Image: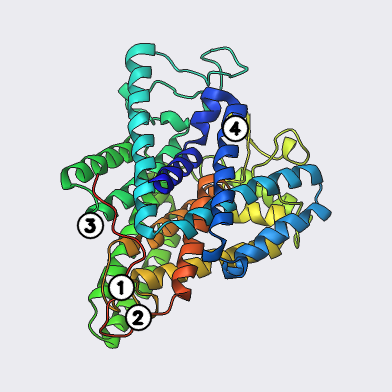
Amino acid sequence: MFLRIYAALAFFLILAGDAFRYSVTWYGWGAVIAIVSAISVTLLIRGRGNWRFGGLPYPLVVFLGLTLLSTAWSFYPQWTAIGWFSTALTVTSAVAIAVTLTREEILRALGTALRLILGLSIVFELVVSLVVRHPILPFFSPYEYSEKLPKLLFWSRDVMLEGGKIQGIVGNSSLLAFVALLGLIVFGVQLAAGTVRRGWGLFWLAVAVATVLMTRSATITVALVLLAAVLLSALLLRRAKSSRGRLGVYAGMVGAVLVVIASISVFSKQILGVLGKSDDLTGRLDIWNAVIHLAQQRPVFGWGWVSYWVPFVPPFDTLASAAGIRQLHAHNAWLDLWLQVGIVGAVVFGALVITTLLRSWSLATDRPQFAVNRPGEYTAVSLLPLLVLVALIVQSFAESRILVEYGLLLLVVFAVSTKRQQLQPAPPVGTSAATPHAEPSRP
């Protein structure tokens, strides 16, 4: 019970960080982070017999080492040290979750956190629209309320009843949309696995769908299409009875990818119009061009790791802004990696993502060497790492969240958990393997 509460709190804290920062200030949020981090370190120390540093994914270890070493050549060494410490705390919590909880327990904890965020977000926006009746700023904002303030500064813009994009307790429509996307994945897997009551699961699935509709994120729309394709491919592979059948599925996947690439090259403007995006991707092209220009000055090892940009420190103080607000990331994780840790860092982090994706794919299609139970026994929960990782990869081309906070946490959780699963020997054919933990009870 304690571990599930701890994991649910960690997921809630990392996914709804702005809700804490807007309500109890950065200091209050930092205090909660310190408590969760202390618990994570304690769990790793007490459970040191169940894991070892050498058993972690090699690209993860190399990336942590590279970002720390970047302090030596960083243009802003003190901020690189702070940024690395923040990254290390996130990775520590992720490793603690991955080595102390089963996939079923991770699924349940993540589901609890997502239900809290989505539920509180709907209530929050309703209170703003029905009671407050005007946009609200964070409680400790240095600004006074004014309709002339940039929209990005508001916690809620009071647009729920007008059909606008709601921001929820996280204060950002794009972030809330991604939380809703995670909800669709997690609640769907829970329903398929039978770990929640059907009516309860369908209710929260409907809440996630409604939130996706009320946030209307182009990135999430693209992610939904790709997730549907990936899920369909995985299920078809599971149903394939022979190697020839699996080869046919893979051939179909390659054909579908080629069709998509051709369609994008021919109908790019029409596709952007359907997604509600301008030709400059709502200002992102300007930000990307500025980042590319700066990254080219230090292309191999970058300017130094910092995770989130520090808006008052050169070169970030003049790098990019949108709607009068200084930007805190490149809106593209791969450009951000090139900027901060160069081509070398981007390659190392890419290796972490790709190897995790490959292990997640193998786990989702239940290849015998990665099977949790009997080889060939399909489980709904085994789809979770793959679907979440695909969502993170799609988002990484429009946001840099995979490098910080919830994106990095989820990536490392599944990178470590799938690596540990890979290292476990497969049970003999015709025998059943005992699971280390009992299946969680239904709420």
User: Is residue 320 or residue 179 the one in the foreground?
Assistant: 179
SS class of the residue under badge 3? helix
For image coordinates 27% across by 81% down, the residue present is 431
For image coordinates 45% across by 67% down, the residue present is 418
Lateral position of residue 262 relative to residue 305, left or right: left
Mark 2 and mark 4: Cα distance apart in space: 45 Å
* CB-based contact (under 8 Å), mark 1 and mark 2: yes
Query: Which residue in the structure is indicated by mark 3?
Result: 192
For image coordinates 76% across by 52% down, the residue present is 303
Query: Which residue in the structure is indicated by mark 4?
Result: 31
SS class of the residue under badge 4? helix
Label 3: how many residues lie within 10 Å, few (<14), some (14-19) or many (20+)? Answer: some
Q: Earlier in the sequence, mark 1 or mark 3?
A: 3
Query: Which residue in the structure is indicated by mark 1?
Result: 373
Q: Earlier in the sequence, mark 2 or mark 4?
A: 4
Q: Nearer the viewer, mark 1 or mark 3?
A: 1
Mark 1 and mark 3: Cα distance apart in space: 17 Å
Check disc 4 and give the amino acid type. Ala
Q: Is residue 248 above or below residue 58?
A: below
The quadrant where residue 159 appears: top left
Query: Which residue in the structure is indicated by mark 2?
Result: 427
Check disc 1 and give the amino acid type. Asn
Mark 4 and mark 3: Cα distance apart in space: 38 Å
Q: Position of residue 240 (x, y in %)?
A: 24, 79
Q: Earlier in the sequence, mark 4 or mark 1?
A: 4
Placement of the C terminus among the 4 image quadrants: top left
Q: How many marks?
A: 4
SS class of the residue under badge 2? loop
Label 1: how many residues lie within 10 Å, few (<14), some (14-19) or many (20+)? Answer: some
Q: Position of residue 64 (x, y in %)?
A: 67, 58
